[in-house]
Structure formats: C-alpha cells, structure tokens
Image (spheres, helix red, strand yellow):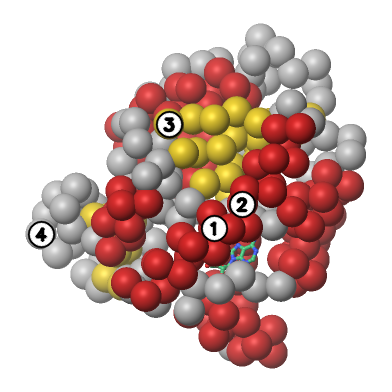
Amino acid sequence: MEYGTLEGIDSVSVVHPPIDGPARLDGSRVAVILLGAPGCGKGTLAFALQRSYGFEPFSTGDALRAEISKGSQLGVQIKALYDNGRLVSDEVVVAMVGEFLQNTDSGRVIFDGFPRTLSQAEKLSGLLADWCARVVCMDVDDDVVASRLLTRYSCKTCSKVYNEKTALPENGGVCDVCGGVDFVRRVDDTDAAILTRLQVYHEKIAPVVDYYSTKGEIYHVDASQSTENVFAVVSDVVFK
Ligand code: AMP
C-alpha cells in the first residue's frame, strides 16, 4: 500500500540511525502497532517511519477504501458501515491483515488503525507470534481530533493531506506535491460520522489497551504534540 505525502511531515528530520544501523533489535522482525483515535496522526507517523526507517505501513482504512472504490462485492457490502463511521467486521479486516503479512517480505511493518477490537488484537498476536511488537497508543482529546477531521481534505490525484486551518497548499488551490487542482474530503469526515467514529473508538479500544497493558507491551504518547516530537518519542520506543 502506497502512502502519499502527509500533512506536516515534510518538516520531519531524521533523528535516529536507519534501522539497519546500530541495531538494538537483534535482527528480529518488528511490527509497530499504532492505536489512536481517528485524526490523531497515525497515518502521518506511519509515513515518517516508512520514510526514515523503511517500515512498510498497512492501513486497514486504506485497504477498505480501495475495496469500496473498486466496487468489489466486498466493497459494496462494507460501504454503508464505512460511510457511517461503524466498524467493518473483524473477520474482514483480520483476513486483510493476514493477506498483507503473507505477501510482504518486509521484516519491518506498521499497522495503522488495526487492531481496533479485542478480538482483532488477539488474532494479531497469533499472526505476529514470531515478531517483536511495539504497541504505541497515541493519546489526544476528542475535540482536537474532531476539529482536525472537519477541516482536513486531500489532493484527489496524489492524496497529499491538507488542513483548512493549519496546512493549506503553499500555492492557493494547487497541490504542493503533484500540481493537482482537485481536492476531496473523506465521506466519513462529517459531523455525524466523526461522532460515531469517536464513540466506537473509545468503546472498542479500551479492552485493547487493557490487553496490551496486561502484557506490558504498550507505550502511551501525547499525540497533541508537534509531529516532530511525536516522531522522536516513537522512534525511541521502536529502537529501545
Ligand atoms: P481509518 O482510515 O483508519 O480512519 O478507518 C476508516 C474506517 O474504516 C473506519 O471508520 C471503519 O469503518 C473502517 N476500519 C478501518 N480499520 C478498521 C478495523 N481495524 N476494524 C474495523 N473497521 C475498520
């Protein structure tokens, strides 16, 4: 799955050696698992980890959007859930993640938006039995993410993300990356869907956080900080 250039990330500098530099990971395969409310910056962070250390991101949201835009039978089935901010079934997303892991030969992966339920977390532990997992929970207030989601939009051509209040294109209505002039908003970035997504997130993520806390595997990061700070903190977690 290709990630486009994401909001704020151009200013991130590499503060750590590349992953195959001084190794603190003993050659293990490493999976970074990003938990956090919609709009907390998981995609931006995944992109930074990809660009700086060669991690391969997998976003279940992106994979589902691809199915919906293909108009596949699965895409048609999940569209209403997606549009209304409801979760797609565990079975569907676990199968997508299983397929991704089967097809990748990367030993460095990032999960963005997965797991979102306890059952998904348990299944992921099974899939990652031989991996070293780094679980990061990105904490941020609901009002902050809701306002970010309501004002975000992206280039229709290259998916570069902008924000009406905090990150406009440098050149008026022209995309900084590809020069495109058509922009889109996500269909689930509406007031009603955002409310549902945040409610669902809190309800379903609490047992996931407990699950990883009990295993002593979770790191909390204040995601209201700048992109650079979040990236630096998470880099320390990944390379600890
Ligand atoms: P995201 O792009 O991560 O904000 O996800 C957008 C939407 O895709 C969510 O509101 C859900 O409808 C669906 N989705 C993404 N990841 C999952 C998941 N792990 N489990 C169930 N549904 C998901």
For the question of whether residue 161 can be seen, the reply is yes
- Identify residue type, mark 3: Asp
Q: Earlier in the sequence, mark 1 or mark 3?
A: 1
Where does residue 169 sit, x and y in percent of width and height? 18, 54
The residue nearer to you, when weighing 211 against 80, is 211
Q: Label 3 belongs to which residue?
A: 222
Relative to residue 36, is residue 166 drawn left or right?
left
User: What kind of element bears circle 2?
Assistant: helix
Mark 1 and mark 2 in contact (Cβ < 8 Å)? Answer: yes
Q: Residue at x 14, y 64 (%)?
A: 173
**Residue, disc 2:** 205
From the viewer's perspective, tell me whether residue 7 is left or right of residue 27. Answer: left
Crowdedness near tag 2: few (<14), some (14–19) or many (≥20) residues, C-alpha within 10 Å: many
Name, please, the residue furthest toward the left: 172
CA separation in Å, label 1 and label 3:
17 Å
Q: Earlier in the sequence, mark 2 or mark 3?
A: 2
Label 2, label 1: how far apart the Cα atoms are: 6 Å
Label 2, label 3: how far apart the Cα atoms are: 17 Å
- Residue 108 visible, this angle: no
